């Protein structure tokens, strides 16, 4: 399913100029939730907004690279070989010579990269939580117990997720069994061989009534 999604992403968003890495990351994310081939086109169309955000990041990164290249050509930024030959004090002076507007662009690109990483992490956690909830519901684990299960886990493989789901199912079954046993232990147990006929009172009640009669007789 991953290959089909990747192919559809490349076709639909070919005009955005996105890198192979970004397309593969998105394909891997969608492959976790798309199970049928007929769902591929809808799923790919649903991430158009995110793909345009990635395009914006990529465009800004390309602009930054162009500006840095121009600085090097103009002699405002020295080559890496010259930096290695200079002493520590000279290196600090060189760093201070970089124009403030160039520093602002570099810092902006760093912030954008961090935002992209945070967005990918949050999206992966949301997708994982939805998948876990669906699996727990399918196994008839009630919502009250699901609230106790950490849904923000990150799994390296589908097998690792499946093992986690099975573990939580076993935990729930064990707790349910304990509560069931406790409820049964509180139920009154009839004495061996004891049976009452309709309208009769228990031996304990009858003994109490007889003692009352004896007290009145002695009066």
Image (cartoon, rainbow, N blue to C red):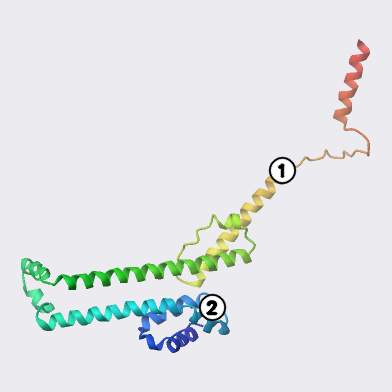
**Residue picked out by circle 2:** 34
* Image mark count: 2
User: Helix or strand or loop: what does disc 2 sit on?
Assistant: loop
> Is the residue under label 2 in contact with that under label 1 (CB below 8 Å)?
no
Relative to residue 81, is residue 188 drawn left or right? Answer: right
**Residue 119 in the image: above or below residue 78:** above
Relative to residue 151, is residue 171 drawn left or right? Answer: right
Q: Quadrant of the C terminus?
A: top right
Few, some or many residues within 10 Å of mark 1 (<14, 14–19, 20+) = few
- Where residue 131 sits, quadrant-wise, is bottom right
Decide if residue 182 is in sight here.
yes
**Residue picked out by circle 1:** 185
Q: CA distance from mark 1 to mark 2?
A: 47 Å
Task: Name which residue lies at 50% across and 61% down.
Answer: 151
Of pointers 1 and 2, the one earlier in the residue sequence = 2
Task: Name which residue lies at 57% across and 58% down.
Answer: 146
Task: Name which residue lies at 41% across and 81% down.
Answer: 24
Task: Name which residue lies at 50% across and 58% down.
Answer: 150
Few, some or many residues within 10 Å of mark 2 (<14, 14–19, 20+) = some
> In the image shown, does 35 or 110 lie closer to the viewer?
110
User: x, y (%) of residue 132?
Assistant: 54, 66
User: x, y (%) of residue 53?
Assistant: 38, 76
User: x, y (%) of residue 212?
Assistant: 88, 19
User: Helix or strand or loop: what does disc 1 sit on?
Assistant: helix
> In the image shown, does 141 or 49 lie closer to the viewer?
49
> In the image shown, does 186 or 145 lie closer to the viewer?
145
């Amino acid at each position: 399913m991953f290959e089909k999604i990747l192919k559809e992403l490349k076709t639909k968003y070919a005009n955005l100029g996105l890198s192979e890495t970004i397309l593969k990351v998105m394909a891997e994310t969608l492959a976790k939730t798309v199970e049928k081939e007929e769902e591929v086109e809808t799923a790919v169309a649903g991430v158009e907004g995110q793909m345009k955000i990635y395009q914006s990041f990529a465009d800004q990164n390309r602009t930054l690279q162009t500006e840095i290249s121009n600085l090097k050509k103009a002699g405002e930024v020295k080559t890496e070989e010259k930096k290695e030959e200079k002493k520590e004090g000279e290196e600090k002076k060189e760093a201070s010579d970089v124009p403030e507007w160039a520093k602002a662009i570099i810092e902006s690109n760093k912030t954008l990269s961090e935002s992209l990483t945070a967005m990918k992490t949050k999206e992966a956690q949301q997708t994982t939580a939805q998948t876990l909830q669906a699996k727990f519901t399918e196994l008839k684990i009630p919502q009250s117990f699901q609230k106790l299960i950490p849904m923000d886990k990150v799994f390296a493989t589908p097998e690792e997720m499946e093992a986690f789901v099975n573990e939580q199912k076993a935990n729930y079954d064990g707790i349910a069994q304990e509560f069931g046993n406790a409820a049964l232990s509180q139920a009154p147990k009839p004495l061996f061989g004891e049976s009452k006929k309709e309208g009769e009172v228990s031996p304990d009640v009858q003994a109490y009534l007889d003692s009352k009669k004896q007290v009145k007789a002695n009066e």
